[in-house]
Amino acid sequence: MSWLQRLREGLSKTRENIAKSVPWNAKSPEEVLEELEYALISADVGVDATQEVIEEVRASGKRDVREALKQALVVQLEPDAFRAKIRKAGFSPNAKKSTVEPAGKVVLMVGVNGVGKTTTIAKLGQYYRIQGRSVMFCAGDTFRAAGGAQLGLWGERLGIPVIQGPEGSDPAALAFDAASSRKARGLDLLLVDTAGRLHTKHNLMEELAKVKRSIAKADPGEPREVWLVLDAVTGQNGLEQAKRFHETAGLTGVIVTKLDGTAKGGILVPIVRELGVPIKFIGVGERADDLQPFDSGEFVEALLG
Ligand code: GDP
C-alpha cells in the first residue's frame, strides 16, 4: 500500500463522516455550504475556523466547492507565518509548506502518558535514520519504570543507542548526560523522552522546564525543538493541555497521533490556530510507517479527495 493510500485509510473515519453528510453534487453551492458547515463543526474544525472557511469558499466564487474548500483548509492548517506564502504561491496539493527537518540537534518530546509518545519517539528515530541521520534516544521518563524499559527495547530493536537511568533518578541530570554524550559522539540527532505524569500538573511543568534548562547547559542553544505529542481522540480537551505545555516549554511543533481512531480529524485546525505552531507528523495507525510527515495539501486531499 502506498504512503498516500495509508494516509487515506487512516483518515477514513473523518472522511466518511464528511462524505456522508455533504451533498457535493447539489445544484446550488449554497446547499453544499450549509451541510458543509455542519460537517466541519462535527469534525472538530471549530466554529471560528469553520466560519472563515465557509466565507473563503463563498468569496472565491468557485462553482467547485470541494476544490475551493481544499484551498481554504490548507491555509487553516498552516501557522500564520506560512499563510501569506501559500496564498501568494497559489494552491498546489504537493507543495511542502513547513518542514519536518529539526532545526537543531536535540528534540525534546513532551506530552501526557498514553498519547503514544514512546512509540512516536521510536518511529521518529526510524524515520530520521532512514533519512541517513545518526540518532540517539534519552529515556527521560524516569518516573515510570515501564517508560524507560519500553524505549530501551525499541532502541535495541532499531539499533539506536539509548541513554537510560535507574527508575526515580533525576531526569534533568539524565538529559544533561545525554546532551553531552550526543555532542561528544558527534551524532546528528538526540530525541529526549520526558515524563507524562507526576503527582501534580505543576510538578510536571516544573520538571520539564528543568530538563530543558539542563540540556541548554550541556549544549548551548539546544533544544532547538520542543515537540508535543497529542492524541486526536482527546479532541478539545487535548488543546487545553497543549496550551499549558506551550506556556512552559515553548513548543515548536506538534505531532498528532491516533487520527485513525476518530471521526474528528478536523481537530488539527484548532491545534494550529490556538498554538500557532506547525504540525510536524501525524499518526494514522500502530505500524512503524503509520507515522507520516505532515503535509497540509496531502492531508486535505486524503480527507476530501
Ligand atoms: P505513551 O504513554 O504516551 O508513551 O504511549 P505509548 O507509546 O505507550 O502508546 C500507547 C498506545 O497507543 C500504544 O498501544 C500504541 O501502539 C498506540 N498508538 C500510538 N500511536 C498511534 C496511532 O497513531 N494510531 C493508533 N491506532 N494507535 C497508536
Image: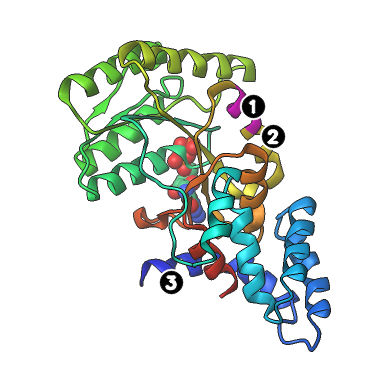
Residue labelled with disc 2: 240
C-alpha span from label 3 to label 1: 35 Å
**Amino acid on which disc 1 is placed:** Arg
Q: Residue 240: x and y, percent?
A: 69, 34
**Does 224 lie within the magenta span?**
no
Quarter occupied by the N terminus: bottom left
Q: Are marks 3 and 2 in contact (CB under 8 Å)?
A: no
| CA neighbours of label 1 inside 10 A, class few (<14), some (14 to 19), many (20+) | some
| CA neighbours of label 3 inside 10 A, class few (<14), some (14 to 19), many (20+) | few
Toward which corner of the image does residue 217 lie, by quadrant? top left
Examine the residues drawn in magenta and state their main secondary structure: helix
**Amino acid on which disc 2 is placed:** Glu
| CA neighbours of label 2 inside 10 A, class few (<14), some (14 to 19), many (20+) | few
Residue labelled with disc 1: 244
Residue drawn at point x = 79 percent, y = 58 percent: 51
Disc 2, SS: helix
Q: Are marks 3 and 1 in contact (CB under 8 Å)?
A: no
Q: Is residue 8 above or below residue 290?
A: below
| Marking on residue 106 | none
Q: Nearer the viewer, residue 13 or 47?
A: 47
Magenta stretch bounds = 243-247
Q: Earlier in the sequence, mark 3 or mark 1?
A: 3
Q: Is residue 98 above or below residue 177?
A: below
Quarter occupied by the C terminus: bottom right
Q: Nearer the viewer, residue 118 or 300?
A: 300
Note whether residue 166 is visible.
no
Residue drawn at point x = 38 percent, y = 56 percent: 287
Residue labelled with disc 3: 5
Toward which corner of the image does residue 20 lie, by quadrant? bottom right
Q: Is residue 147 above or below residue 204?
A: below
Disc 3, SS: helix
Residue drawn at point x = 47 percent, y = 65 percent: 7
